[in-house]
Amino acid sequence: MEVLKEIRDEVKGTNSRLDQTNSRLDQTNSRLDQTNARLESLEGRVDSGLASLGERIDKTNTRLETVDGRLRFVEKRLKDGFEELSAKIETVSARQLEAEANTTAELVAVGGLIMKLHSEMVETTRHHEKRISALEKRR
């Protein structure tokens, strides 16, 4: 009978320890339920944040496409403007070269006329000096 009492006491001790283990398990389950609830809430916020982020990314992409289109338009205008400016510069350069050539030719012609005028003036001056000399000799 002693053996049965010992077995009974051991069973009671084991039951007591099982009750404590069950109590701790219930507490752990409760904490797990709370953690799961917080994780589900966090998951919902993350999903909402990701959706919001996706919308913002879409809006940003749309705005970037608009900016890209405007930039291409400005680049084309600049390219066309530079091409037009380059053509005008080439025209001005050609006209300047032509004007310089004409000016050079005219300066050469003026130089020739000045030389001719100088020669005629020297000749006329000599002629006048001879006449003056001749008049002075007559007196």
Image (spheres, helix red, strand yellow):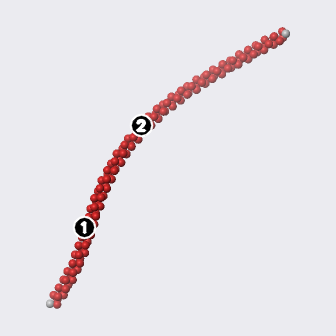
Do labels 1 and 2 touch, CB within 8 Å?
Answer: no
Q: In the figure, residue 76 lies in which quadrant?
A: top left
Q: Residue at x 33, y 53 (%)?
A: 53
The local secondary structure at tag 2 comes to helix
Q: Amino acid under label 1?
A: Asp
| 131 with respect to 90 (left or right) | right
Choose between 113 and 58: the one closer to the eye.
Answer: 58
116 shown above or below 64: above
| Mark 1, residue position | 33
What residue is disc 2 on? 76
Q: Position of residue 63 (x, y in %)?
A: 36, 45
Q: Earlier in the sequence, mark 1 or mark 2?
A: 1
> Viewed as shown, does residue 121 lie left or right of 78?
right
In which quadrant will I find the N terminus? bottom left
Quadrant of the image occupied by residue 128:
top right
| Image quarter of residue 29 | bottom left
Q: From the viewer's perspective, is 61 left or right of 83? A: left
In the displayed structure, would residue 9 be above or below residue 47?
below
Tell which tag, 1 or 2, sits nearer the viewer. Answer: 1
Q: Secondary structure at mark 1?
A: helix
Q: Amino acid at mark 2?
A: Lys
- Gap in angstroms between the C-alphas marked 1 and 2: 63 Å
Residue count near mark 2 (Cα–Cα under 10 Å), binned few <14, some 14–19, many ≥20: few
Residue name at image x 48 percent, y 31 percent: 87
Q: Judge whether 36 appears above or below 119 on screen.
A: below
